[in-house]
């Protein structure tokens, strides 16, 4: 499987990731299902449908769990390249298929919608998007969703920029630089439809709670123990500068959904 090296190194501890990443709002999941349920299949395509929804890069099942709770008669498949993350999902009762986005064991034109939560920037390449295009039915949707801390809030911006300083000279793929959008210039049969910005999940807790979340990022997670201790001390000072020793820090956030459609 083709998986980014930093993702391989940084996403090995499924239990830590699972414990320190937020879930998704009901509003976001409901909106995604509303969009998918409105898809009109071209005549002749219904018989070839394997799945209504396939999730790529399902991680430890944060989005998956919320989605499964709301499914009606939809056929659903979760996929994830990390073995440890797949095993974590199994502990939640989710049976996921271990595979990467660039090699999906699915038939042509067999999936109504593909969803990626917090992951598309990791495989925003021509090979993966061509594979997504192959398995989507005509009029099928690619739904990309991210939870975002609101960097329009000054203290959040300062903290996240401090975190980003640890990305190094060869930074990993990120959502915020929007470079992931470039791949759509090369696979023109999947086109942008609309974006939706929604209220984010309630995200609040102690400084340790916030720092644990930040250290679940791939490039932070792969640090040595000594590097983590030094970085944690530095980031704690940024948090305390704005919140003192508060045990209940409210982190402003939002959820962004980017909707794409297969047009051929």
Image (tube, grey):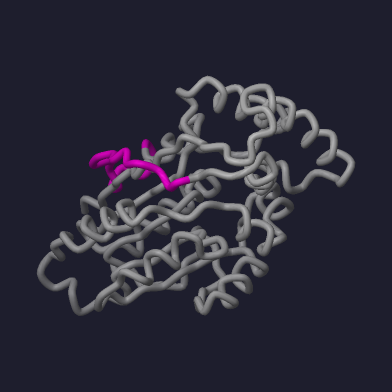
Identify the image quadrant of residue 17: bottom right
Q: Residue at x 54, y 43 (%)?
A: 204
Give coordinates of residue 169: x percent, y percent. Answer: 73, 28
Q: Residue at x 80, y 33 (%)?
A: 233
Magenta span: 185-202
Q: Residue furthest right?
A: 226
In front: 251, or 158?
251
> In the rendered view of the protein, which quadrant contains the N terminus?
bottom right
The relative height of residue 99 versus residue 197 in the rendered view (above or below) is below
Q: Residue at x 71, y 60 (%)?
A: 13
Give coordinates of residue 55: x percent, y percent. Answer: 42, 63
How many numbered dots are placed on residues in this image?
0
Give coordinates of residue 110: x percent, y percent. Answer: 30, 71
Residue 146 can be seen in this image = yes
The relative height of residue 117 versus residue 174 in the rendered view (above or below) is below
Q: Residue at x 65, y 30 (%)?
A: 164
Task: Report whether 82 appears left or right of 80.
Answer: right
The answer to if 40 sits in the magenta stretch is: no
């Amino acid at each position: 499987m083709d998986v980014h090296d930093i993702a391989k190194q940084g996403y090995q501890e499924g239990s830590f990731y699972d414990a320190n990443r937020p879930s998704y709002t009901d509003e976001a999941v409901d909106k995604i299902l509303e969009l998918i349920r409105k898809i009109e299949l071209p005549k002749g395509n219904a018989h070839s449908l394997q799945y209504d929804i396939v999730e790529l890069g399902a991680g430890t099942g944060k989005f998956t769990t919320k989605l499964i709770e709301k499914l009606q008669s939809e056929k659903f498949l979760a996929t994830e390249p990390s073995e440890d993350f797949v095993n974590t999902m199994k502990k939640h009762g989710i049976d996921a298929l271990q595979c990467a986005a660039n090699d999906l064991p699915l038939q042509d034109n067999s999936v109504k919608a593909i969803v990626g939560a917090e992951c598309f920037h990791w495989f925003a390449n021509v090979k993966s998007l061509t594979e997504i295009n192959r398995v989507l039915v005509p009029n099928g949707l690619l739904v990309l969703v991210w939870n975002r801390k609101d960097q329009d809030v000054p203290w959040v911006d300062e903290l996240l920029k401090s975190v980003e300083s640890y990305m190094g000279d060869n930074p990993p793929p990120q959502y915020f630089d929007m470079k992931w959008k470039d791949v759509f210039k090369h696979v023109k049969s999947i086109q942008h439809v609309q974006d939706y910005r929604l209220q984010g999940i309630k995200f609040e807790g102690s400084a340790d709670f916030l720092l644990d979340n930040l250290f679940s990022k791939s490039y932070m997670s792969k640090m040595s123990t000594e590097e983590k201790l030094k970085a944690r001390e530095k980031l704690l000072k940024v948090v305390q500068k704005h919140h003192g020793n508060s045990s209940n820090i409210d982190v402003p956030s939002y959820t962004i959904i980017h909707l794409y459609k297969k047009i051929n």
